[in-house]
Amino acid sequence: MTISYLPRVCPYSYMTSLEKLDETKLPPIEAFYDQLNDESLKTTDYERAQKTWTHFGMRTLKDYHDHYLLSDVLLLTDVFENSATQ
């Protein structure tokens, strides 16, 4: 499966200010802790986030954030279009 279609991860709790978007590297795995479900991120999921960062040539956390949002919107659009034709 291509990297774009795999589940994505986002460091929601880490994003506490707009200045974080200017950071030039992916935050550490601990920053991806899921406070809602009280779960740490799996190493394999973090490695996939690192591969995504590299594969798409991301330079800032804003690039990662925007890619994450775009992927979500495109997948949701695809779901809506497929359900409308059935």
Image (tube, rainbow, N blue to C red):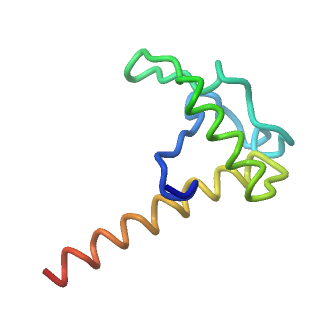
- Front-most of residues 36 and 43: 43
How many marks overall?
Answer: 0
Name which residue lies at 73% across and 24% down. 28
Location of residue 79 in the rendering, given as x and y in whole percent from the top left corner: 29, 68
Q: Quarter of the image for the C terminus: give it.
A: bottom left
Query: Farthest bottom residue?
Result: 85
Left or right position of 46 against 18: left
Q: In which quarter of the image is residue 22?
A: top right
Q: Position of residue 50 (x, y in %)?
A: 71, 39
Q: Which residue is drawn at 79% across and 54% down?
A: 58
Q: Please report the residue visible at 66 percent of the width from the left and 23 percent of the height from the top.
A: 29
* Residue 76 falls left or right of residue 80: right
**Residue at 76% over, 38% down:** 20
The residue most toward the front is 1
Percent of width and height locating residue 3: 58, 54
Tell me if residue 4 comes above or below residue 7 in the rendering: below
Q: Nearer the viewer, residue 39 or 2?
A: 2
Relative side of 76 to 82, left or right: right
Residue 78, image x, y percentages: 35, 72
